[in-house]
Image (cartoon, rainbow, N blue to C red):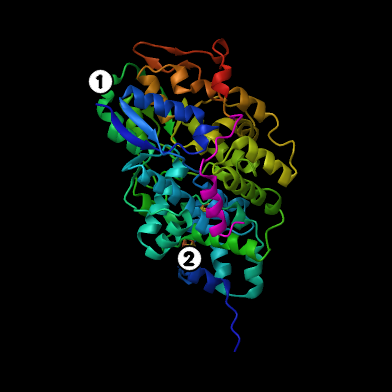
Amino acid sequence: MKKKLGFYPGCSLEGTAKEYSESVVSLSEQFDIELKQIPDWNCCGATAAHNLNKTLSLVLPSRILAQAQKNEMKEIVVPCAACYNRLSVTQYELLKNDQLKATVEQAIDMPLNTSIRILNVIQFIQEYILPEIPEKLSHTFDKKVACYYGCLLVRPHNILKFDRPESPQFMDEIMQMLGAETIDWPFKTECCGAGLSVSRTELVGKLSGKIVREALDRKAEAIIVACPMCHANLDMRRPAIDQYLEMKTEIPVLYITQAIGMACGLNERQTGTRRHLVKVIGNYFTKTRIPVENNENNPITVEEII
Amino acid sequence: MHQIKTLSNRIRKNTGVDSIRCYQCGKCSAGCPLAGDMDFTPNTVMRMIQVEEKETDKKLLQSEAIWLCLSCEMCISRCPMEIDIPKVMDFLRQESLKEGLQNKSANHNIIPFHQSFLDMIRFTGRSYEIGLIADYKLRSKKILQDITLAPQMLMHGKLPIFPKAVKNRKNIKEIFKKTNML
Ligand code: SF4
Ligand code: SF4
């Protein structure tokens, strides 16, 4: 029987991180899981809200949780690390402060109980995908990779209680299951520059540049991420990175769900790798050896753009 | 006697963070990815709060550091006293806005971006990138920025042309009203 889970894509996954959404959804279908979007969901407010208005930064995520609750969802999958962070922190703050909870409920005009399980993408994979992996794996991911966790998945540790805050391992373990060799490196949880991407691009070039340089120095052939902001900064901001590093870098950045999807035989339309600005070209796999096709021979159609 | 509330006092009252507990070990700044670009490093920010002087308080609220802070939480995760610097930074930003002391440089880039972002949510319930970037360009007057990136993003299907909005727009409007964002 199909497993059903609540799903909060968040704004990035509808835009710049469309391929993340595609790979999460395709992977779930492959593993017989139905992801049901929270009806009429809103933006979590991301960095902007808690920078400018604390109450708003708690109220926006609360409306999302209340919508999920209204639709009887007990467990929601939140692939965006930023949304996962905001939702988890909000739930934590409301749990320990009844007065705050009342204020929030009044603002969203909906009741709220704070017992929804919020799963980040790694937890979702560990719980629902990993057990079936040995059966579904069709290719060996034959590369040396750098698993990059970023900040929002692991911090604040006292609230999220996920993996180890300084040298997390869960993504590494997943990649090793696929056959990849993971490097040990000190940049796993360094910040990529996140919210400054548009307003201070040169700083993002520097912070993300240091991450890319370290991965290259340690001979990684791909960087694996689980956050659309990390991906945007490491992939789309590559021109700023290259400018900071004074060299042209070509190391691709893959979402963990794309890596698993590829190893389970999903095509590049399903994993969305064609949408990357830094091309994903070359042999990633042994065993059956499917080369990832060059994008130019397989252009993105108008429907996919809109 | 008339008592003037220092910044340190207000921080304690509003965020629960007791700045005086910081003993200046510097671990926060050692881990902060932007310490080298800030006008005041995170441990200096803490020290400035501790001195409880009006002039220093003002200097801090005018600083660029409070806007550069990425909320990456590296500082608190390494602080031996578990001092929540990101929370303090959030509070300092909001105070800086309230008192109209925003840093001049941040007022041209970082702050307008956050404002554009929130406006987008206010009107559609979601953040929608084309609209966001257009709005930010107008506010920051950086019309040419990212001009080479946009067509590439469009071609890769990363910039949807039509926004998807929340249906219950009234609910979102109410939320902004009730949280004093109007
Ligand atoms: S790490 Fe903590 S105690 Fe040390 S200087 Fe920073 S805030 Fe103060
Ligand atoms: S949260 Fe801000 S102050 Fe703390 S380490 Fe990150 S950027 Fe630096």
Q: Nearer the viewer, residue A250 or A21?
A: A21
Above or below residue A181? Residue B63 is: below
Which residue in the protein does label 1 denote?
A: A135
Q: Image quadrant for the N terminus of chain B?
A: bottom right
Which residue in the protein does label 2 denote?
A: B15
What is the CA distance from the residue labelled 1 to the residue labelled 2?
Answer: 50 Å
Give percent across and percent down for residue A153.
Answer: 42, 43
Above or below residue A134? Residue A113 is: below
Q: Nearer the viewer, residue B66 or A169?
A: B66
Give percent across and percent down for residue B30.
Answer: 51, 54
Q: Chain of mark 1?
A: A
Q: Chain of mark 2?
A: B
Check chain identity for marks 1 and 2: say if they share one: no
Instruction: Report the residue at 52% width, 54% height from top.
Output: B175
Helix, strand, or loop for circle 1? helix
Q: Is residue B36 left or right of residue A39?
A: right
The label shown at residue A292 is none
Amino acid at dot 2: Thr
Give percent across and percent down for residue A229.
Answer: 52, 38
In which quarter of the view is residue A297 placed?
A: top right
Q: Image quadrant for the C terminus of chain B?
A: bottom right
| Magenta stretch, residue numbers | B159-182
Q: Is residue B163 magenta?
A: yes
Amino acid at dot 1: Glu
Helix, strand, or loop for circle 2? helix
In which quarter of the view is residue A126 placed?
A: top left
Above or below residue B96? Residue A169 is: above
Q: Is residue B30 left or right of residue B63?
A: left
Instruction: Report the residue at 60% width, 52% height from top.
Output: B68
How dense is the environment of label 1, judged by Cα within 10 Å: few (below 14), some, or many (20 and up)? few
Q: Residue furthest bottom?
A: B1
- Is residue A31 visible in the rendered structure shown here? yes
